[in-house]
Image (cartoon, helix red, strand yellow):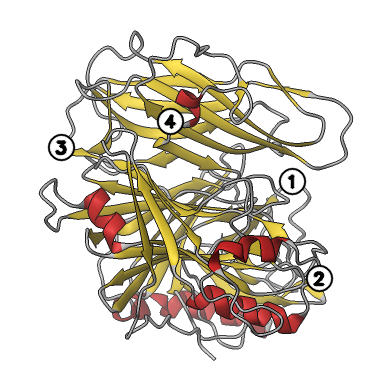
């Protein structure tokens, strides 16, 4: 028997002695996901503050492979492999390097088997590890986007030769996911009297090239006839159009404009009336790569109550920057699940981030690997949106976050300030990709006081660009935003900001007048490194102008000018050396 196989057998024997001492917090399986289209590989997982446990249920009598990788390939991967043979469990911790996909056993075995069985051609393995093992051959499991690789084979490895049979072309795959802030199905889902409705575009011709923002208006008065709650939304993408449907937002408001045309796609900016353009009360938010979002138990967005608007605007952003040949018909949209069952808590959504105003409020120099910006929702705006009508301090519970960024964003954080102290980051993704902008459901709600402030911070990598990137929805422009899901609901739609540039220094080391800052920046065509540093410093020091708004309030908005003075910044935990 080889030393490798002996190691596997030894590990199977000792695992039960280790588990009860390592995992000290009770855990219940919370998440499930099919990693394979035909549900031949089902992954369940749960976690606490220090450990994560997986359950792989795979339609095979052979071996099961599972791993974490940065690239989506077998190179530089953190892998486990296990199987059942002769009533024994074989399981071990492997890794691959940058030059080979062949698994090599880790010297430090940090993945542990909890149980395993094989019944009627189905193998079930339960295994676990620390979130961060401090092993250079293991990937830390964080709140960041992570790439899973999976495989299985009809055959077990050969115990005599230690040879592992190739899994084949069709028994492997890659899944991008948030392991620590993934969507989860509530225990009570679906409650009684639950129904589905689809809000879709109707054979819209996606342009052969470029970006297009389309709005479709729906009136649900006759569709949903009694008070309900939205408890789930999911994308419906026309097959073949997955690369082109970039984002979808669903807004609602009371529109009585007789010029509005219903269920017909119109360009949001150039063809839609003001009544549609100004409808910004968020009900659902989806971006490329996202899947379903379930509201937690007994929480939902109220619909069709006595004071709830009945008009909904579906905004779809199409992006087509590949080789173009012809227009593409599309009928994508959102599927909404709602219930007539009375829920105790009304949820709301508020959009936070940078103002998009013909792209001139934001300037990102080219050739920079880590340029930072931050948009602020000031205490005055927070009090306006989340405080009581009498102006007293109130609080809400943040449930989830949907981040938005385009091609050059590489990190996004939702920061949280209270007076002069920074609290723990509410949510973040340090491996952000605009091709996977899934919704994030927080493991535990975060209390937000109405005298706090929030910041959406983005880190950009423009090293591959030869031009200045400005703010905008197109993928050659940039956006830095977060849709925050919370309860109880308030009349609060948007909290956006833009830099005042009041600390902007010219190339000649003179203070640029604030009224001329935008013009000065617009005339810069070459951003040399020395001036880029000055500009970054100016943004860090300049005040942000915040605008907070709600179409349901009068006055509809408030404006502030603010820069937090943080004495105690929050320090993110550093990964193991």
Residue shown at the point (34%, 68%) measured from the top left? 416
Determine the residue positioned at 25% across, 29% down: 191
Q: Are the two marked residues, 4 and 2, in contact with CB atoms closer than 8 angstroms?
A: no
Q: Is residue 269 left or right of residue 219?
A: right
Q: Residues within 10 Å of mark 1 (few under 14, many from 20)?
A: few
Pinpoint residue 114: horizontal percent, then vertical percent: 41, 68
The answer to whether any part of residue 418 appears in the image is: yes
In the image, taking residue 262 as reference, residue 565 lies left or right, namely left
**Image quarter in which the C terminus is found:** bottom right
Q: In the rendering, which numbered label is found on residue 279?
A: 4
Numbered tag placed on residue 344 in the rendering:
3
In the rendered image, which quarter is residue 104 located in?
bottom right
Label 3: which secondary element: loop
In the image: residue 218, left or right of residue 226: right
Which comes sooner in the sequence, label 4 or label 2? 4
Could you tell which of marks 2 and 1 lies nearer the N-terminus?
A: 1
Q: Which residue is identified by label 1?
A: 170
Question: Whole-Å distance between the Cαs marked 3 and 1?
Answer: 47 Å
Image coordinates of residue 326 in percent, x first then y, are: 86, 26
Q: Say which residue appears at 81% left-offset and 70% top-offset.
A: 526
Quarter that holds the N terminus = bottom right
Residue 25: percent from left, percent from top: 26, 71
Looking at the image, which is closer to me, 137 or 249? 249
């Amino acid at each position: 028997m080889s030393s490798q196989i002996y190691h596997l057998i030894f590990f199977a024997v000792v695992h039960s002695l280790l588990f009860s001492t390592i995992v000290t917090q009770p855990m219940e399986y919370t998440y499930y996901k099919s990693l394979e289209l035909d549900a031949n590989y089902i992954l369940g997982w749960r976690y606490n503050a220090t450990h994560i446990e997986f359950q792989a249920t795979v339609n095979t009598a052979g071996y099961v492979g599972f791993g974490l990788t940065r690239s989506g390939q077998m190179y530089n991967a953190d892998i486990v492999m296990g199987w059942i043979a002769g009533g024994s469990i074989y399981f071990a911790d492997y890794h691959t390097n940058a030059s080979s996909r062949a698994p090599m056993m880790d010297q430090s075995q940090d993945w542990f088997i909890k149980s395993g069985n094989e019944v009627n051609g189905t193998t079930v393995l339960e295994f676990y590890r620390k979130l961060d093992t401090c092993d250079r051959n293991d990937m830390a499991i964080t709140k960041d986007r992570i790439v899973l690789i999976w495989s299985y084979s009809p055959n077990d490895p050969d115990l005599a030769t230690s040879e592992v049979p190739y899994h084949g072309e069709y028994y492997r795959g890659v899944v991008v996911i948030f392991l620590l802030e993934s969507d989860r199905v509530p225990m009570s889902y679906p409650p009684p009297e639950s129904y589905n409705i689809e809000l879709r575009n109707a054979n819209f011709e996606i342009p052969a090239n470029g970006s297009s923002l389309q709005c479709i208006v729906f009136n649900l008065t006759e569709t949903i006839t009694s008070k309900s709650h939205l408890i789930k939304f999911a994308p419906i993408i026309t097959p073949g159009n997955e690369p082109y449907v970039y984002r979808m937002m669903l807004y609602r408001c009371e529109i009585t404009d007789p010029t509005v045309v219903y269920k017909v796609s119109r360009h949001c900016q150039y063809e839609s009336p003001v009544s549609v353009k100004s409808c910004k009360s968020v009900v659902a938010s989806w971006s490329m790569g996202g899947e379903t979002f379930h509201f937690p138990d007994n929480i939902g967005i109220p619909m069709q109550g006595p004071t709830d608007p009945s008009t909904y605007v579906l905004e779809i952003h199409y992006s087509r920057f590949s080789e173009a040949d012809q227009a593409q018909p599309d009928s994508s949209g959102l599927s909404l699940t709602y219930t007539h069952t009375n829920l105790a808590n009304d949820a709301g959504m508020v959009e936070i981030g940078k103002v998009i105003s013909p792209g001139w409020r934001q300037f990102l120099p080219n050739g920079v690997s880590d340029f930072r910006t931050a948009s602020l929702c000031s205490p005055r705006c927070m009090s306006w949106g989340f405080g009581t009508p009498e102006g007293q301090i109130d609080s809400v519970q943040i449930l989830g976050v949907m981040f938005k960024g385009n091609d050059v964003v590489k990190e996004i954080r939702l920061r949280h300030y209270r007076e002069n102290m920074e609290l723990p980051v509410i949510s973040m993704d340090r491996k952000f990709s605009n091709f996977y902008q899934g919704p994030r459901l927080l493991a535990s709600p975060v209390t937000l006081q109405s005298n706090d402030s929030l910041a959406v911070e983005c880190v950009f990598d423009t090293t591959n660009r030869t031009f200045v990137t400005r703010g905008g929805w197109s993928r050659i422009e940039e956006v830095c935003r977060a849709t925050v899901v919370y309860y109880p609901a308030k009349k609060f739609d948007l909290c956006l900001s833009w830099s005042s540039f009041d600390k902007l220094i010219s190339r000649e080391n003179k203070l640029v007048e604030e009224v001329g800052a935008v013009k000065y920046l617009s005339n810069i065509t070459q951003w040399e490194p020395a001036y880029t540093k000055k500009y970054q410093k100016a943004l860090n020091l300049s005040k942000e102008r915040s605008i907070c708004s709600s179409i349901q309030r009068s006055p509809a908005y408030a404006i502030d000018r603010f820069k937090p003075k943080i004495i105690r910044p929050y320090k993110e935990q550093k990964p193991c050396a």
